[in-house]
Image: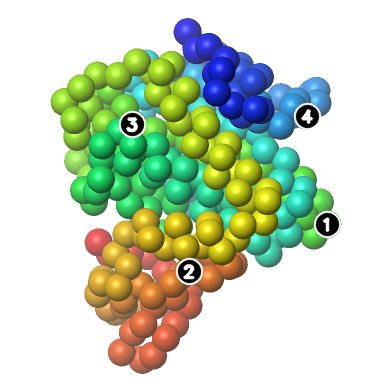
């Protein structure tokens, strides 16, 4: 069903399609324990029966209608303290792909939800294995809603919901993977400044007052920046404050 892309150097050059599985992230992690896989190996499925999301959530996607895949990367050049940069390049690559599809109102909701018109179209789950101070292996899981028409909750959307057009999943995979590879190569080349500024330009809510909650307290904050460690920097009525992912929730 899926073909090896002709337009990448290594991402997707080993492509494993399984009609169904529990979770492509889990399956790819298991495969790496059994044999040495080349960097860029992609595991993709039609039907994920126990898709995993961030913060222990589940990821639901109707069978055969969306892209549900995991990519193996070996960013052993990346210090652990910079692991957020992998989140950043994956997010901006997906955003770039969607903008090229004509969805101009596509933004990254920190740290890595991809929104179109404020609705979630793509979720990313990155699972890193560390070796000392560096990242030995990274499994980049992407759930991208393409042809699905009905969503519960309604805060989700798909390419079809936004454009009214059904797409060919293999063709879309061949547009997405080069975006991911080229953003990852920027990271490998050490172009952190480019990554930071591109990520920031695509950041949902930048310079806008938004409601947040942290440690049980609700407050308003204006997103000013995301630092190299991936902390969200807000300007609040109590001055500038920074938060890790576990420390803050968006209320809208
Ligand atoms: C999120 O909570 O937004 C992240 C969702 C990530 C879903 C993808 S689908 C492919 C890969 N396999 C999983 O089990 N999860 C990720």
Left or right of 172? Residue 4 is right
Q: Would you name the residue on which mark 1 appears?
A: 132
Q: Would you name the residue on which mark 3 appears?
A: 145
Structural distance between the alpha carbons of marks 3 and 1: 36 Å
- The image position of residue 129, as x and y in percent, is 72, 46
Tell which tag, 4 or 2, sits nearer the viewer. 2
Bin the neighbour count of mark 1 within 10 Å (Cα to Cα): few under 14, some 14-19, many 20 and up.
Answer: few
Structural distance between the alpha carbons of marks 2 and 3: 26 Å
Q: Earlier in the sequence, mark 2 or mark 1?
A: 1
Number of numbered discs visible in the structure rendering: 4
Q: Would you name the residue on which mark 4 appears?
A: 33
- The image position of residue 240, as x and y in percent, is 42, 86
Left or right of 165? Residue 178 is right
Q: Earlier in the sequence, mark 3 or mark 1?
A: 1
- The image position of residue 125, as x and y in percent, is 52, 43
Bin the neighbour count of mark 4 within 10 Å (Cα to Cα): few under 14, some 14-19, many 20 and up.
Answer: few
Q: Is residue 162 visible?
A: yes
Structural distance between the alpha carbons of marks 4 and 1: 19 Å
Q: Would you name the residue on which mark 2 appears?
A: 226
Where disc 1 sits, the SS reads loop
Asked if labels 1 and 4 touch by Cβ distance under 8 angstroms, the answer is no
Bin the neighbour count of mark 2 within 10 Å (Cα to Cα): few under 14, some 14-19, many 20 and up.
Answer: many
Quick one: 248 or 171, which is closer to the camera? Answer: 171
Answer with the quarter of the image where residue 42 lies.
top right
């Amino acid at each position: 069903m899926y073909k090896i892309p002709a337009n990448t150097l290594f991402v997707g050059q080993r492509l494993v399609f399984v009609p169904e599985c529990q979770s492509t992230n889990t399956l790819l992690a298991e495969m790496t324990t059994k044999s040495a896989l080349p960097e860029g190996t992609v595991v993709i499925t039609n039907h994920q029966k126990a898709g995993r999301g961030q913060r222990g959530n589940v990821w639901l996607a109707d069978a055969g209608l969306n892209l549900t895949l995991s990519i193996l990367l070996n960013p052993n050049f990346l210090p652990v303290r910079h692991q957020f940069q992998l989140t950043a390049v994956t997010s901006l690559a997906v955003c770039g792909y969607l903008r090229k599809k004509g969805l101009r109102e596509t933004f990254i909701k920190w740290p890595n939800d991809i929104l179109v018109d404020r609705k979630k179209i793509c979720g990313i789950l990155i699972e890193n294995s560390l070796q000392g101070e560096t990242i030995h292996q990274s499994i980049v899981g992407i759930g991208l809603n393409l042809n699905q028409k009905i969503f519960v909750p309604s805060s989700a959307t798909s390419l079809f919901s936004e454009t009214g057009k059904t797409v060919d999943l293999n063709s879309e995979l061949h547009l997405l993977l080069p975006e991911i590879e080229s953003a990852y190569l920027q990271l490998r080349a050490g172009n952190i400044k480019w990554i930071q500024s591109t990520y920031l330009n695509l950041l949902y809510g930048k310079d806008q007052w938004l409601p947040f909650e942290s440690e049980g307290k609700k407050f308003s904050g204006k997103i000013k920046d995301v630092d190299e460690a991936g902390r969200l920097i807000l300007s609040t009525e109590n001055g500038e404050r920074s938060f890790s992912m576990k420390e803050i929730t968006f209320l809208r």
